[in-house]
Amino acid sequence: MVEVSTSILSIKEGEEQKSFLNLEVAKTDYFHIDVMDGKFVEKNTYEKMLQNASYIKRISNLPLDVHLMVEDVKEAIDDFLAVEPNIITFHLEACKTKEMVHEMIRYIKENGCRVGIAVKPNTKIEEVYEFLPYIHMCLVMTVEPGKGGQTFLSDMTKKIETLKKYVEEQNLEIDIEVDGGINLRTAPEVKKAGANVLVAGTAIVMAKDFKVIIDELKN
């Protein structure tokens, strides 16, 4: 069964409360929290996302799917552990050494949270293979991270297929999440390639009826 993680990045200022409650009613599986520091990526959403995640935690029981697009991974993990996320995903590219990657994986797990690793479009998927046995999810970026509403990079489909094949060959239990340009047109392609968690933002929050889009993305 495919799950949907709704990115709250595109939600209009002042409409947060209504949108979060409507998303819960529409049965999104996760709230996707896009955390950007203005350094690893151009945009800075850090404080806003911390605020929104804290607010969601107070009004909803739905799990938080935290995606860290930051240079200082450890500091961001500490800040966002406070909102008790279901999973924290950090970028492979933000870690200077393999030891650091393993250290971050250990640290997140020790704090009772599931862990994911994200890879940018230009990063070879093979670079994440050695870490897969220790994590719960691999996030394949299908746009360059840092901006909402970008167009899906169709050559990323092959990357998802390669990852899925490897995961099956190694008999690993891991979610494959995709993020970037996911909508009703691109969803069938990534699902067929092997993704089972779809991050969608603009496609859902710009729709008149969240439930219709979420149901269609799942099915």
Image: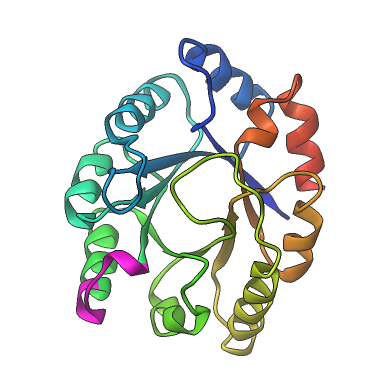
- 43 displayed left or right of 77: right
Q: Residue at x 50, y 56 (%)?
A: 144
Q: Residue at x 25, y 68 (%)?
A: 106
Q: Residue at x 54, y 29 (%)?
A: 10
Q: Quadrant of the N terminus?
A: bottom right
The answer to whether one can see residue 105 in this image is yes
Q: Nearer the viewer, residue 41 or 54?
A: 41
Where residue 61 appears, x then y in whole percent? 48, 30
Where residue 183 appears, x then y in whole percent? 73, 44
Region of the chain picked out in magenta, as a range = 92-100
The answer to whether one can see residue 27 in this image is no
Within the magenta stretch, is there residue 164?
no
Which quadrant would residue 118 be assigned to in this image? bottom left
- 109 displayed left or right of 170: left
- 55 displayed left or right of 172: left
Within the magenta stretch, is there residue 94?
yes
